[in-house]
Amino acid sequence: MNVVDLTRPQLSDAFSRPITYLRVSVTDKCNLRCVYCMPEAGLPWLRREDLLSYEEIAELVRAAASLGVRSIRITGGEPLVRRDLHRLVASMAAIDGIDDVALSTNAVLLEEQLPQLVHAGLNRVNVSLDTLREDRFLAIARRPGLDRVLAGIDAAIAAGLGPVKLNCVVMRGQNDDELQAFAELTRDREIFVRFIEVMPVHENLDLQREAYVSSDEILERIGQIGELQPVEGPGGNGPARYFALPGAEGAVGVISPLSHDYCERCNRVRLSADGKLRLCLFGDHHIDLRSPLRAGATRDELAAILRASMTIKPERHHLTLGDASSRMRAFSEIGG
Ligand code: SAM
Ligand code: SF4
């Protein structure tokens, strides 16, 4: 159930779902090349002039906040490769109505940027990590950097950004034998490991059918090292269901993007780095916000466009495992 504060303005879609959460992609570029997300050679990157500036993003977020959006998650691509990200964090944190500014990152550059990000007002961080072994990190992320990721996680906890959520995309034969090792991380630290079923995108349609490990199997295998009890999650806007090992400080969670219970609770929309408001993770429901913004639309006019866009937010996605017809780019919605 989405909790609604009736004292605040409210944006809701055609199915009466309150929309309170905006994911903001600041770049399509990345310093890793995870096998399930991007081709090794990279993507045809957006042109610099097509990217929204930080000032343009802030203006759109002000319009969204005026309608009741309260939480922002900065994502990508890899958001920390965009210069001076702390400037954007500071302007998001200063917007009236925005209560929570979070970041999704691969954490390779996190340790060095963390002091500025925290000072700017960052509240939370989610880190993607699919393996605890350097050789595998090279195979899955196709770049080195596990030591820097682990240092970034430690730095985030030390800086008071805990509980840190780790997002782990599970792939059979590649990292599924590390499920229990990841779960062990939750025993004495406030770490929430979220196991994500691999989703079909252009890059991995071959991979994903054989790589798929269901949430039920994930929980069953972790249950072999201790009885899992359902627990409350660490808060935030996530679609995960959480379970804890006996006496654990943290918990493990599972995210099943292919199941529709996620859609029923959907409270989110996403702004792409080039200014498209994407209404659903899957499929192509979007509207262009950059054109009206650059044509000088006022904040009220932008808010009216945002409100009108809610009518095309679909009730649910229509994606299934092995769906080769889906038209998707690398997505940053899940897990973040
Ligand atoms: N670069 C940042 C990161 O990796 O956290 C932010 C963007 S990344 C695209 C956001 C999340 O999407 C990551 O947790 C990543 O693991 C997840 N993701 C990307 N492609 C996926 C796929 N095909 N299936 C499942 N999760 C995926
Ligand atoms: Fe980069 Fe994140 Fe995609 Fe990995 S999942 S390639 S870190 S954007």
Image: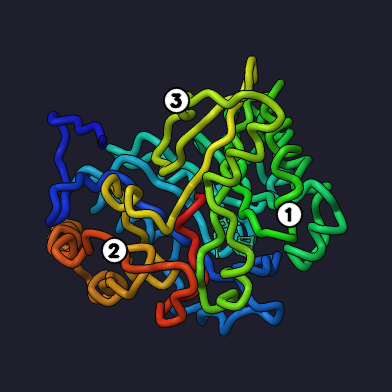
First along the sequence among labels 3 and 2: 3
232 to 197, vertically: above or below:
above
Would you name the residue on which mark 2 appears? 279
Residue 149 or residue 48, whichever sits in front:
149
- Give the foreground label among 3 and 2: 3
Q: Is residue 13 left or right of residue 238?
A: left
Residue pictured at 57% horizontal, 42% vertical: 194
- Quick one: which residue is furthest to the right in this view? 135
Tell me: 276 left or right of 12: right
From the viewer's perspective, is residue 221 above or below residue 49? Answer: above
Asked if labels 1 and 3 touch by Cβ distance under 8 angstroms, the answer is: no
**Ligand 1 near label 2 (Cβ, under 8 Å)?**
no
Residue 325 found in image quarter: bottom left
Q: Is residue 29 above or below residue 14?
A: below
Real-space Cα separation, disc 3 to disc 1, in angstroms: 26 Å
* Quadrant position of ligand 2: bottom right
Describe the element under mark 2 as helix, strand or loop: loop
| Mark 3 → mark 2, Cα distance in angstroms | 27 Å
Res. 175 mark? 1
Q: Is residue 254 left or right of residue 172?
A: left
In this view, the residue farthest toward the top is 247
> Tag 1: residue type?
Asn
- The residue positioned 46% from the left and 80% from the top of the image is 324
Whole-number angstrom distance, CA of label 2 to CA of label 1: 32 Å
The amino acid sitting under disc 3 is: Glu
- Is residue 82 visible to us here? no
Q: N-terminal of the two: label 2 or label 1? A: 1
Q: Which residue is mark 3?
A: 232
